[in-house]
Amino acid sequence: MGHMVAELSKKAKYVRISPTMVHVVSVVNQKGGVGKTTLTHLIAKTITDPAIGKKCLVIEVDKQRSLSGLKDSIQEKLGEKFSMPYELKFLNDLGDVKAIVEKEAENYDVIILDTPG
C-alpha cells in the first residue's frame, strides 16, 4: 500500500486540483458484490495518507452499512476505539446526498459516495 501511495504522490504534482472546489466521486455499479465498498475504502484511505494529505468524507448510502461494519469489526479486534482516516457519514436515502454534499463541500477536498448495488 505504501508503494501505491508513493506512486500516487509522485504523479499528484502533475494533477491540477482547484483549492476551492470539492471533488465528488461516486462509486457505482448496478450489481452487488463487485467491490464498490472496498474500492471506496481504498481510495479514501489512499488520498488521506500523509503523503497526499487530502481531507475526505465518505458518504455511505448502501443500506448494508459495510464501511460502518468494517470500522466496528476493526474496533472490536483491537479492543479499543478506532477511527477511520477519513470521515464517514451514513444516509438512508440518495435524495439526501445533494444537501449533504453542498453542506460539507467547504470542509473536504474529496467526497466519495459509496452507493448500493
Image (spheres, rainbow, N blue to C red):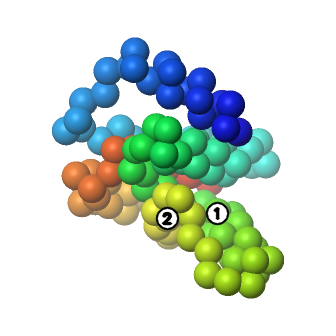
Q: Earlier in the sequence, mark 2 or mark 1?
A: 1
Q: Where residue 112 appears, x then y in whole percent?
A: 47, 47
Relative side of 3 to 14, left or right: right
Residue under label 1: 67
Q: Residue at x 57, y 42 (%)?
A: 46
What secondary structure is found at the residue carrying circle 1? helix
Marks 2 and 1, how far apart in space? 8 Å
Residue 45 left/right relative to 71: left
| Rendered location of residue 58, percent (x, y) | 48, 56
Q: Looking at the picture, tell me which residue is in the foreground, 84 or 112.
A: 84
Residue 30 image position (x, y, % from top left): 66, 42
Is residue 61 visible in the rendered image? The answer is no
* Left or right position of 53 against 102: right
Q: Position of residue 15 (x, y in %)?
A: 38, 19
Q: Are marks 2 and 1 in contact (CB under 8 Å)?
A: yes
User: In this picture, is 32 found above or below 104?
Assistant: above
- Report the front residue among 66 and 5: 5
Q: Is residue 105 above or below residue 103?
A: above
- Residue 67 lies left or right of residue 34; in this view the side is left
Question: In the image, which disc is placed on residue 16?
Answer: none
Most foreground residue, 116 or 80: 80
Name the residue rendered at 30%, 41% in the picture. 22
Query: Is residue 108 depicted above or below 88 in this figure?
Result: above
Which label is found at residue 88?
Answer: 2
Q: In the image, what residue type sits under mark 1?
A: Leu
